Image (cartoon, helix red, strand yellow):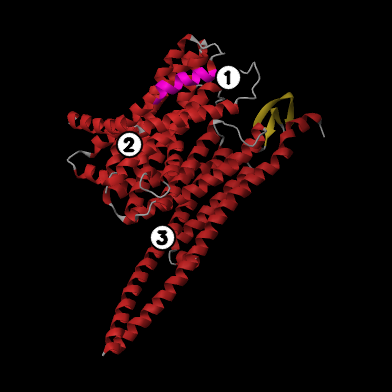
Amino acid sequence: MDPLLLEAYSTVISAVPFVVGAYILIWVALAVFVGASYIKARRIQKELDALKSSLEHLKEDRSKRA
Amino acid sequence: MFTKFLALLKKDLLLEARSKTVLSSMLIYALLVLTIYGAALSQTADNFDILQVSSGLLWALIVFTSLIGLNKTFSHEGEAGALYALLLAPFEKSLVFLSKLCANFIFLVLLEVIVVPLFYFFFLQTSSLSVQSVLLILPLLLGNVGIAGVGTLLASITQRSKSGDILLAILLVPLIFPLLLACVSASAAVIIGSAELMEGFMRSCGIAFSYDAIMLAASYALYEFVLRP
Amino acid sequence: MKTKLLSSNKLVLAVVCIALLLILLDIFMAFFISPLVRGARLSEPVIIVGQMVANKLLFSQKIFYLHVPVALSSFIALLFTAVFSIRYLIKRDPLDDMRAYSCTEIALVFVLATMASGILWTRFEWGSWWVWEPRLTTYFILTLMVLAYFVLRLNIEDADREASFAAVFGILAFINVPISFFVTRIVPSSIHPVIFRTDSGLSSSMLIPFIAGMIGCLLLSFVLYKLRISLKKSDFELQQVKEEFESLYKKRLKEKRVVGDK
């Protein structure tokens, strides 16, 4: 390859891992955030559903007794 | 209103004059930090130019010691319900802020009156200080105002929390960082004293002054939301 | 829950798609269409694809196409934290407190992403992983302040005080951001001269992906904000249902005891 072209592009190859790494890290941070939120949301929803059904159960019981 | 402010200030200063806990703690702590500096710098070569780092070391010392002092000036308010009494009294909340700020500022100034010559005694005797070193007073005062201002507000917030002491440090240091940069720059300019640096001196002091003005105004405005039973 | 959340709000789903598309457009254009930025001068000019090129061509600048939009989004997230904090202090609406909290969470994610990409960029540009240069220093302070916000929130027991104190700190932190930004660049340094980067105007092939990425990141942060705040709202609902359940259960226990006595 023409030595001048080599010089012009000399920094490119060494730069690639850093650039790619930077982009990947940004996406990883976002993915971790969304993942953690999703897991927490599912847990809250499960607890909410369980509590709500128990609440209904209790209310039915009381209305039956009354 | 001014008399009320003076009364509050007098109360804080009198309390300190009698118990001397705050100043003595700050002084002892500063002395200990200087001792640690001695160990830290023990391996430097003879021709080590300590003037370059002295400004930074001095300001690090001041910030660490101020954390001790800020925590202590509020701790005795929590005891015996003194804070509740203060809130019930017919004082405007902003006066409480100003009086506490002044008390903290005075404590810092008193500390530096002793500690800065001590720092010179331990570390700067072999270097040639420039003539303008006396101007060091200006960045010291500006820095004290900023640290006291933001620190008083944050100490009111953290004083009643579980991990009050370390929480104050976590909150204060990032907020105070720009002020620190400006003060270290100004102090270094004054200690080293070359001509180009002196132009930078006025600029750094200007930056420190603007920081103080902005942050003090913000702290003053926000204080009423912080002082509640 | 996420699918339930998103499908119940078609607007949010649409916004997510647009945001991701824009960011992908940004990345695609950044790597394939935008010209490489010029670096140090070459010993002799060379002709590439019919054009005279006199400088080295830099690939590392490509980081800027996603790094800067992410950084600016974190800054805007903090702006909204301050806005909601001020609203909370004035109106005392707990919803505003939840909003401020969510905005700060978004700011945290974006700030950490900025720091990560910033460190990699620094490593390539300066040769070491960390340099106390204005950009990194400002963002480091920002990271510390956002982390301090969370430490503060988790350490105050009383919920009412927690909200007020967090609001006060949020406002102070936001005020400190432009201060840090300027001070790190303007402070005269006796030893290290600060190198001011003069940004020459961006050509359209560089501007378009940047703006696409910018809008994409803002929309993405909005969506993430909605996600977090719906999480908080359902948590709040959970607490209320718990309380209702407990009070009803206690009543039932009392009734049982009364009946038992009889």
SS of the residue at dot 2?
helix
Mark seen at residue C232:
3
Mark 1 Cα within 10 Å, few/some/many (few <14, many 20+)? some
Q: What residue type is labelled 1?
A: Ile
- Identity of the residue drawn at 18% across and 42% down: B89
SS of the residue at dot 1?
loop
Marks 2 and 3 sit apart, C-alpha to C-alpha, by 29 Å
Q: Name the residue under label 2.
A: B219
Comparing C6 with C123, the one in front is C123
**Vertical arrangement, residue B213 with respect to residue B224, above or below:** above
Between discs 2 and 1, the one toward the N terminus: 1
In this rendering, does residue C61 appear at all?
A: no
Q: In this view, does C82 lie to the left or right of C208?
A: left
Q: In this view, does A22 lie to the left or right of B75?
A: right
Residue B73, picture quadrant: top left
Q: Mark 1 points at which residue?
A: B50
Q: Do circles 2 and 1 both sit on a common chain?
A: yes
Mark seen at residue B223:
none
Provide residue C40's location: percent of width, then percent of height.
Answer: 68, 27
Range of the magenta residues? B111-123
Residue A8, picture quadrant: top right
Tag 1 near tag 3, CB within 8 Å: no
Comparing B75 with C241, the one in front is B75
Provide residue C172's location: percent of width, then percent of height.
Answer: 38, 39
Query: Which quadrant, please, contains the N terminus of chain A?
Result: top right
Residue B145 magenta-drawn?
no
Say which chain tag 3 marks. C
Q: Nearer the viewer, mark 1 or mark 3?
A: 1
Q: Which amino acid does label 3 sit on?
A: Lys
Tag 2 near tag 1, CB within 8 Å: no
SS of the residue at dot 3?
helix
